[in-house]
Image (cartoon, rainbow, N blue to C red):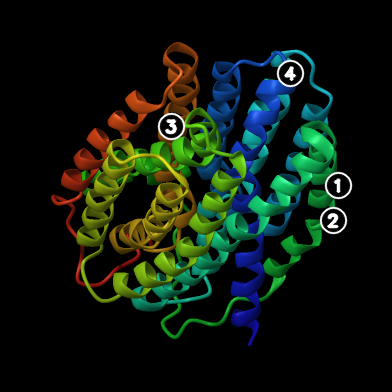
Amino acid sequence: MRTILLVLVAGLILSVGNGFRMSLGIYVPDLLSSTVFSASIIGLTYGLFNLLWGAMSPIAGAFAEQRGYVKTLCFGFFGVSLSFYVASSAIHPLHFLFGIGIIGGISAGVISVPVIIGGVSKYFEDDKTQSTVTGILMSLAATGMFIFTPINQFLVTTFKWSFSFQITSMFFLFIIPLSFIFLLPKPQKKDKKEFTKRKISDVIKKAFKDKSYNYLILGFFVCGLHVALISNYLPVFAKIKGLETTIAATGLTLIGLFNMIGTLISGKVSGIIKKKYILSFIYFVRSIVIFLLLILPTNNFTIIAFSCCIGLLWLSTVPPTSGIVSNRFGTRYLSTLFGIVMVSHQAGAFLGSFIGGLVIDIYGSLDIAWIMAIVISLFSAIIHFPIIEKEKSEEVFA
């Protein structure tokens, strides 16, 4: 019963964090029309947010593993609240970049996916259960996009971006008590082992000598680029094509809905067949879906169909990716090692955010960005094949 409560509350934390992060694109049209910020500046801000989000993941994961998850998450929630409050009064682009890009990015990284998954995984022992639980967590995380995209659309339509940010700031203060779920005692393992105390730097150095780990890092870069490009610029893409931005908001909501289905399936299948094949399949199909968006006439149906398809492939990469990290190294330092993989993801998100805004400013179109997304998606589909998975995971750093 306690572990069920843990998974539900941890999923809620991910839902809130992902929901607001992945629906920031809803604010772009209003920011462009009511401020002096260019698409490139907004893209740079969102890109920096994503980059620092990723960079903080392994740091926060290591801190949580050493000092406790409750302290870590409380700090993260307070920081996200502060970031929205600071940005809400921004007039100069650098003020906006400091609030959302720097404070927001650092704080969001503290309550990120690797930290939560690493914390929850310590309550479960075998690979199959961990993959299934990760799938459930990511499905719950996906509800954030489904729930908060229409909420943010309502806020920005009713109150505009500045007051909406202030409302969001207050919301994050109220949910700080969710952090206390990690006070639950961990179940006693049957074959309890005494672990040797290790330096995090030694753990990281050993992980980087593993070729499979490096391939995984390269592949996850692509996932971040796709997620940032689509979530940040689908509303602008719809507007460029002469559609109402509300259809893009509906599309992002559908991505969140179908993401729930995709991550559940991915988590379940990851416990049955090799995870690297699942990842290759996901990235190959993504390239096809984005290619169809590029060549087909853009209308409401196209946006809806694209959103449903890409939603199935959205965060479905996380269960097999974290599963491979756990398979290669065990769960003792999963928050740290999966956090490093997430740095690559968020480096891709930085590129996707920045390039998207840049090509809009230069060409008034996203076509070049979509072509880039297709090419590197095919690269990612190939790079996962050399990954070696063990028959059974073991604690490498025992």
Question: Where does label 3 land, which residue?
Answer: 347
Mark earlier in primary sequence (2, 4): 4
Which residue is at 70% across, 14% downward?
A: 94
Q: Residues within 10 Å of mark 4 (few under 14, many from 20)?
A: few
Q: Kindly indicate whether the residue at mark 4 contacts the one at mark 2 (C-beta within 8 angstroms).
A: no
Q: Nearer the viewer, residue 281 or 74?
A: 281
Question: Where does label 1 land, which residue?
Answer: 170
Badge 2 amino acid: Phe
The quarter of the picture where the N terminus appears is: bottom right
Q: Nearer the viewer, residue 111 or 196?
A: 111
Q: Kindly indicate whether the residue at mark 1 contacts the one at mark 4 (C-beta within 8 angstroms).
A: no
Mark earlier in primary sequence (3, 1): 1
Badge 3 amino acid: Ala
**Which numbered disc, 3 or 1, marks the residue closer to the eye?**
1
In this view, 301 is above or below 129:
above
Mark earlier in primary sequence (3, 4): 4
Q: CA distance from mark 2 to mark 1?
A: 7 Å
Q: CA distance from mark 4 to mark 1?
A: 23 Å
Question: Where does label 2 land, which residue?
Answer: 174
Q: CA distance from mark 2 to mark 4?
A: 29 Å
> Image check: 314 left or right of 111?
left
Q: CA distance from mark 3 to mark 4?
A: 27 Å
> Image check: 208 left or right of 49?
left
Considering the numbered disc 4 on the image, is that residue within a helix, a strand or a loop? loop
Question: Where does label 4 land, which residue?
Answer: 35
Q: Provide residue 87's location: percent of width, then percent of height.
A: 77, 28
